[in-house]
Image: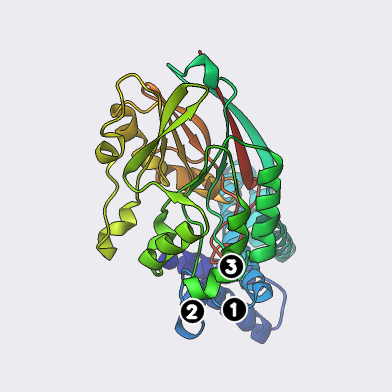
Amino acid sequence: MFQVAALCLALYVAWRLIKPLKLRPWIKYLLSTLALAATLHHYTVALFWGTRASPEIPAALIMVLGWAFGSVLLAASLTLFTDLTGLLMRVLYKPLGLVMLRSPTLRAALGITALSLSALAVWQAVQVPEVKTVEVTIKDLPPDLDGFRIVQLTDLHASRLLQGPWIEAIVEKTQALNPDLIAITGDLVDGTVDARRDDVAPLHALSAPQGVWVIAGNHEYYTQYQPWIAHFKSLGLRLLLNEHSIIQRNGAAFALAGITDKSAAVHGQPMPDVGAAVAGIPAGMPIIMLGHRPDTAKTSAAAGVALQLSGHTHGGHILGMHKIVQMANDGYVGGLYQVGNMQLYVSYGAGLWAGFPLRLGRASEITLITLRAP
């Protein structure tokens, strides 16, 4: 569906932005062809070099393709806004409306703006994220756990785009925070174990007094789910797959639970089961749930969870587009939400999928969450 929509936007750009330009016809045809090709690059790459989930091509080429794809999307958005405004102005003040609808100079400016913004978006996408600090008051949290520090990492997406040195920088920033516990909420990798072994090796250096805990995201299921689960364990990462563990410090405790992802349905793996994850937790003990997708929040809230940590949305990637991503994720896209008696924190994520390497106004993050007793 996304691919069809992108193809339609490319045709719109060819018609309303490229066609009016004062260029030779063959140049217009070439630009239109490149715009269409940019929206189809996922299929082309998957056909010859890896898969859509894990394009096995050089990082520089991934960034160029992402820039081209982003340029088409941004050009379509800017052109559509200009056309709609022009139609309105044609009624209110016809001369200005005609300029907005017909001016080749304005069309050229829109194209240059789209190309520039897309380049900025790719640059922002591959930066090592800054630390974002959040304080969350947890109902029934024992006073001895006040100030407990959790670093949430999510959507690392180790790939040919975000390779070992980038992962190592994430690890160094995380360890510098001296957290009590580290929670990785899915989508660690894109690609097979053999392809990404060196890229994820720095994760072995992650450590915290109360452990480094991991759940599966949707991308874990796209290539070699079972081998990846075994490999995560070999790195010292502790998995929570529809289960929980009791975290204790100074005689006080809370339950840390985690669920799988609904992508398991087409791979014959266990579906997310909040009930199973919280079964057996002592009554009255605070529960923190790790769930990759935020759309499980209402189920977690109904099960008595106090706080859910999620990712998956990447913050919507681009300011404005985040509203569409929000609608696709039950109204959640990034930040802290109140869901019934539960709080939900949705991280913008540290990395992103190499097939859409764009961030504009939705910066990546390493999240330091400090728990507070009431």
Q: Nearer the viewer, mark 3 or mark 2?
A: 2
Horizontally, is 100 left or right of 311 in the view?
A: right
Whether the residues at callouts 1 and 2 have beta carbons within 8 Å, the answer is yes
First along the sequence among labels 3 and 2: 2
Q: Is residue 334 above or below residue 144?
A: below
Q: Position of residue 141 (x, y in %)?
A: 46, 19
Q: Position of residue 272 (x, y in %)?
A: 30, 47
The residue nearer to you, when weighing 347 against 43, is 347
Report the residue marked by disc 1.
57
Q: Is residue 220 above or below residue 149?
A: below
Report the residue marked by disc 2.
50
Q: Position of residue 148 (x, y in %)?
A: 57, 27
Say which amino acid is labelled 2: Gly
Report the residue marked by disc 3.
69
Graded by Cα atoms within 10 Å as few (under 14), some (14 to 19) or many (20 or more), the crowding at tag 2 reads: some
- Label 3: which secondary element: helix
Q: Position of residue 178 (x, y in %)?
A: 67, 37
- Identified at 58% across, 67% down, the residue is 69
First along the sequence among labels 3 and 1: 1
